[in-house]
């Protein structure tokens, strides 16, 4: 069954406004710090929402319970999801391909950090780097904030302090291998107490840091 058309409100982006397709919404929010956006079922709902503050529509059930990335409204899982937490994820176009990763506040979905795009990468590598990036950032700030990831592989690599990738090193991804090396060195030299929690995709929908490109 075909999905219904959606309209996207961008409150904070390169050019705030109402857009009638996801690609344009992505164009306005990609690489914009703390971008704020949400999807609606009709153009009228989107235009009305654009006149409201972003906070009125985030975390509250509106015309749809999903945002542009197909994620559910997380307020219904408030008793299960730790609100003061970070979620990390990666996206890769191809395998290997163009890869980027990011971390967001789990509930507000406001972007905290983003890296990439990097050439000749993989999802596993990106998810591992995102997890270590979050750990290092929180360690530097003296925070014990929990981190959500939907990657068992990244969790295992962090736990074992070892990257077990089949990715081949090329001139195009030499920087990624350098980043992986530095990430492993950081894990070997540092301790942390941040809980690393597997995101329950089956029950909660896509992880908030998801790039929405599936």
Image (cartoon, helix red, strand yellow):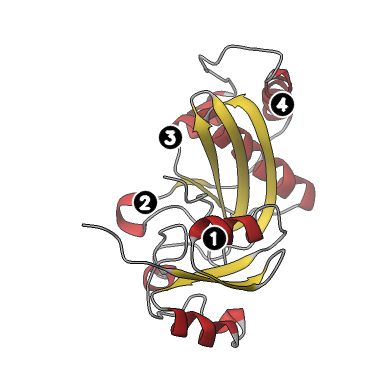
User: Could you say which quadrant of the image residue 52 lies in?
Assistant: bottom right
Label 3 crowd (10 A; few <14 / some 14-19 / many >=20): some
Which percent across, then down, holds residue 66? 40, 66
Q: Which one is nearer the viewer's eye here, 49 or 153? A: 49
Chain-order first, disc 3 or disc 1: 1
Residue occupied by mark 3: 152
Measured Cα–Cα span from mark 4 to mark 3: 20 Å
Chain-order first, disc 4 or disc 2: 4
Residue occupied by mark 2: 200
Query: Is any part of residue 85 visible from this angle?
Result: no
Is residue 143 toward the left or the right of residue 66 in the image?
Answer: right
Which percent across, then down, holds residue 22? 50, 59
Label 1 crowd (10 A; few <14 / some 14-19 / many >=20): many
Chain-order first, disc 1 or disc 2: 1
Measured Cα–Cα span from mark 4 to mark 1: 25 Å
Label 2 crowd (10 A; few <14 / some 14-19 / many >=20): some
> CB of mark 3 within 8 Å of CB of mark 1?
no
Residue occupied by mark 4: 179
Residue occupied by mark 1: 106
Which residue is at a point 78% across and 52% down the rendered structure image? Answer: 141
């Amino acid at each position: 069954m075909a999905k219904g058309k959606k309209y996207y409100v961008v409150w904070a982006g390169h050019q705030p406004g109402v857009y009638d397709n996801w690609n344009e919404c992505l164009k306005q929010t990609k690489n914009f710090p703390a971008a704020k956006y949400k999807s609606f079922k009709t153009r009228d709902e989107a235009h009305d929402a654009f006149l409201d503050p972003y906070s009125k529509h985030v975390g509250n059930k509106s015309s749809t319970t999903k945002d542009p990335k197909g994620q559910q409204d997380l307020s219904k899982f408030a008793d299960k999801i730790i609100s003061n937490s970070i979620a990390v994820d990666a996206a890769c176009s191809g395998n290997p391909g163009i890869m980027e990763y990011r971390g967001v506040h789990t509930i507000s979905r406001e972007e905290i950090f983003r890296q990439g795009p990097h050439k000749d990468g993989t999802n596993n590598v990106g998810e591992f780097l995102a997890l270590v990036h979050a750990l290092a950032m929180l360690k530097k700030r003296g925070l014990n904030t929990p981190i959500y990831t939907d990657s068992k592989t990244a969790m295992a690599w962090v736990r074992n302090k070892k990257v077990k990738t089949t990715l081949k090193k090329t001139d195009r991804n030499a920087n990624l291998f350098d980043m992986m090396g530095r990430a492993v060195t950081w894990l070997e030299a540092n301790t942390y107490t941040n809980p690393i929690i597997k995101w329950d995709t089956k029950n909660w929908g896509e992880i908030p840091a998801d790039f929405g490109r599936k």
